[in-house]
Image: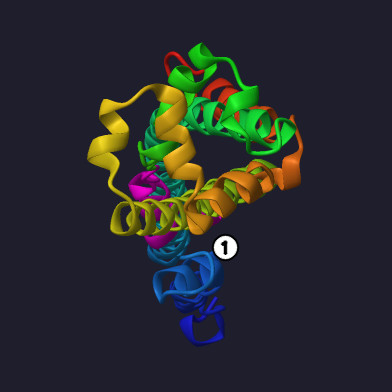
Amino acid sequence: MPSALRPQNSATRGGGRRTEGADDRPGGKERRRSSSGGPSSPTLRTAGRKGSGDAAVRHEAFGRSARAFALQFAVVFLGVLVTFVGSGIIERWRQARAVRTTMQLVAGELEYNLDRMRSVCDKLRFDRRGMLMFERCGMDPDRIPEDSLVHYAALAGGVRTFSLQDDALEVLKTSGLASSVEDKRLLMELLGCYREMEDFRDNVAAYNRRKIEAIDHLFAGSDLSAAAASAPRDAWRTMLADPMFANFIASSSTFFGGGDETYFDRLLGRVETTLRTVGAQYGAEGCR
């Protein structure tokens, strides 16, 4: 067959081969897209995984930092709270200790005052018994046994003094510790007890003034040197002849308590009760 009429197999085959290039082969386009950086590109997949990993790392780091901050804040807050609470507890303990120490001093002071009061009350009872004796006998020494006249010769002298010690109580009041005493009833009892002792001190001072005035008047108007050298009965006649001294003897038996026999016992009993209460509550030695 003439060559001009033959099919161009070579060209077709050559062109077919050219046609069956990368574009015509199955998967060719996908491979081309992949190579050009499409969605299925390995580089993008790696970058995606790397981006996700970075975000997770950042999230985890943020969580750790948040927890660390919360922990540090909790530690600081608890530290401040413990400091304040601890300071309050220490301050209350210090106040309670100061109150206890001061109340023990008050108990010792009460015991001292009580001993002094017992001594003074004994002497005042002595004076009162002698005065009542003269009253019953109509102020007539001739109706009184001589030994009784000798026994009560101290009525013409012997001033009965009582000095109240209240330094510990003043410390309790002026230091502000009184407001820290939890038992307010005991505090009121203590203050009332001191007021009664102050009244007793003032009454003793007033009694002494009356007695000193009577004795001064007696010494100014009588020759007691001669009376002292004479018999007890004669000495009492001389003393009772002085109107001011005789008035003191006749009117002073009711000076304390209005003549109530139990006045001194009740007064001492009040102080004793307060002393025992303070000693028992605050552990004062010898006061229970």
Residue drawn at point x = 58 percent, y = 15 percent? 145
Q: Going by the image, does 183 lie left or right of 260? A: left
Return the x and y of residue 34 as percentages of the image width and height.
47, 68
Question: Is residue 126 shown in magenta?
Answer: no
Res 273 seen here: no
Residue drawn at point x = 50 percent, y = 52 percent? 207
Return the x and y of residue 233 as percentages of the image width and height.
47, 25
The residue where tag 1 is placed is 27
Categorize mark 1 by other alpha carbons within 10 Å: few (<14), some (14-19), many (20+).
Answer: few
> What type is the residue that disc 1 sits on?
Gly
Nearest the viewer among 89 and 21 is 89
Which residues, given as a range, are shown in magenta?
162-180
Nearest the viewer among 234 and 133 is 234
Res 206 seen here: yes
Q: Is residue 96 above or below residue 17?
A: above
- Could you tell me which secondary element the residue under label 1 belongs to? loop
Nearest the viewer among 65 and 79 is 79
* Magenta: main secondary structure: helix
Return the x and y of residue 212 as percentages of the image width and height.
37, 53
Q: Is residue 25 above or below residue 158?
A: below
Question: If the image is split into quadrants, where does the C terminus sit?
Answer: top right
Q: Going by the image, does 180 lie left or right of 162? A: right
Return the x and y of residue 163 as percentages of the image width and height.
36, 45
Residue drawn at point x = 74 percent, y = 41 percent? 259
Residue drawn at point x = 46 percent, y = 18 percent? 151
